[in-house]
C-alpha cells in the first residue's frame, strides 16, 4: 500500500469493541457510543451486588438447546402464573405466582426478592448460607433480568445465572451457571453435592422445554394472533414494551419513537 495515494496505516485497524467487567462478568458492546457499563448496570447492581458473584467460583455449566426464539426464554421466566402448574413437582409449590413481588426496571428488566428453598431436589441446602448472606433467612430467594439476555436466580447458598443466546430465529442456546463461594469447593463431598443442584436445574429446564417450544410452534402458524395479557403478566408486558422501543416502535400505537 506504499504506492496508494492518501493511505494512512495509522487509521487502518480492526473496529474496536467496548468491554468492561461487572461482578465477575465480562460485557462487550458493539456500539462505540454506548453509555459506560457502570451506568448501564447501576440499577441492577444496586439490587444484586449483595450476591458478590465476583467472590464466587464457577461450579457447573449446563448447556441446553431449545427450539424457540430467544425472547421467549426471557418471557417464560417471568410468566409467574405457570409456576404452580408447570413446576408443581419442583419449585412451584414454594413460589406463589399470585403474590410474586417484583420491581420493573428499564429495558424490560426486573428485580424480585421472595421466600424460596435452595434449588435441590428436596429443597434443602447441601452446604450453608453464603457468608455475605449470613444475615438473611434460610428462605432467602431473589431473581432478576438485565437486558438483553442475562437472567439470574439466587438462594441463600448459591447464585445461578443463565444467558439465552440466539443461534437462529427459532433456536436458542441456554447456558446455565451455578456459582458457589470459593470455600464451598473445599468440601470433600463437593462433587456429589453439586450433582443435586445440577439435577434440580435439569428438571426445571426440561419442565419448561415443551411449553417454550410449543409457544414457538404456535407463533409460526399462519393463524397466530396475539391475545390480551392478564394482570399477572406485567413483567412479560414490560419485556415486550422494551423490545418495541428498541426497534423504534411505540408500544402504545406503533408510532415511531422519534415522531
Image: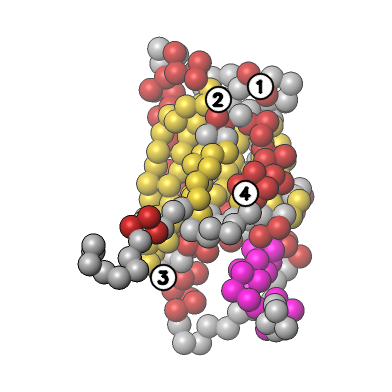
Q: Residues within 10 Å of mark 1 (few under 14, many from 20)?
A: few
Q: Which residue is drawn at 26% across and 69% down?
A: 4
Q: Position of residue 17 (x, y in %)?
A: 46, 53
Residue identified by numbered label 2 = 55
Pointer 3 residue:
169
Q: Residue 213 placed where, x, y %?
A: 44, 65
Distance between the alpha carbons at the discs numbered 4 and 2: 23 Å
Left or right: 61 as drawn, with respect to 36: left
> Is 62 situated left or right of 208 in this image?
left
Figure quadrant of the C terminus: bottom right
**Disc 3 and disc 2: Cα gap in Å?**
36 Å
Where is 25 relative to 171, above or below?
Answer: above
For the residues carrying marks 4 and 3, which lies nearer the camera in this image?
4
Precedes in sequence: disc 4 or disc 3: 4
Q: Which label sits in the foreground, 3 or 2?
A: 2
Q: Nearer the viewer, mark 4 or mark 2?
A: 4
CB under 8 Å between discs 2 and 1: yes
Which numbered disc flags the more N-terminal residue, 4 or 2?
4
Give percent across and percent down for residue 235.
Answer: 69, 59
Report the disc number at residue 132: 1
**Eyeballing the image, is 111 above or below 242?**
above
Q: Quadrant of the N terminus?
A: bottom left
Q: Is residue 17 visible?
A: yes
Amino acid at each position: 500500500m506504499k504506492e496508494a495515494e492518501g493511505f494512512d496505516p495509522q487509521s487502518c485497524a480492526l473496529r474496536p469493541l467496548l468491554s468492561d467487567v461487572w461482578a465477575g462478568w465480562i460485557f462487550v458492546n458493539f456500539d462505540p457510543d454506548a453509555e459506560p457499563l457502570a451506568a448501564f448496570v447501576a440499577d441492577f447492581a444496586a439490587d444484586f451486588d449483595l450476591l458478590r458473584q465476583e467472590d464466587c467460583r464457577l461450579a457447573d455449566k449446563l448447556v441446553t438447546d431449545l427450539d424457540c426464539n430467544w425472547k421467549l426464554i426471557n418471557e417464560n421466566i417471568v410468566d409467574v402464573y405457570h409456576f404452580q402448574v408447570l413446576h408443581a413437582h419442583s419449585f412451584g409449590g414454594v413460589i406463589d405466582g399470585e403474590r410474586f413481588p417484583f420491581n420493573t426496571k428499564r429495558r424490560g428488566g426486573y428485580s424480585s426478592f421472595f421466600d424460596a428453598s435452595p434449588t435441590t431436589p428436596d429443597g434443602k441446602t447441601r452446604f450453608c448460607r453464603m457468608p455475605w448472606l449470613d444475615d438473611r433467612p434460610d428462605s432467602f430467594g431473589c431473581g432478576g433480568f438485565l437486558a438483553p439476555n442475562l437472567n439470574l436466580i439466587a438462594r441463600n447458598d448459591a447464585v445461578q445465572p443463565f444467558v439465552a443466546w440466539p443461534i437462529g430465529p427459532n433456536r436458542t442456546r441456554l447456558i446455565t451457571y451455578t456459582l458457589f463461594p470459593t470455600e464451598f469447593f473445599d468440601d470433600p463431598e463437593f462433587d456429589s453435592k453439586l450433582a443435586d443442584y445440577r439435577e434440580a436445574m435439569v428438571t426445571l429446564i426440561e419442565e419448561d422445554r415443551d411449553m417454550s417450544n410449543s409457544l414457538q410452534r404456535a407463533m409460526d402458524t399462519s393463524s397466530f394472533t396475539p391475545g390480551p395479557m392478564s394482570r399477572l403478566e406485567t413483567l412479560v408486558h414490560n419485556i415486550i414494551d422494551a423490545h418495541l422501543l428498541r426497534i423504534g416502535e411505540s408500544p402504545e400505537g406503533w408510532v415511531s419513537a422519534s415522531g
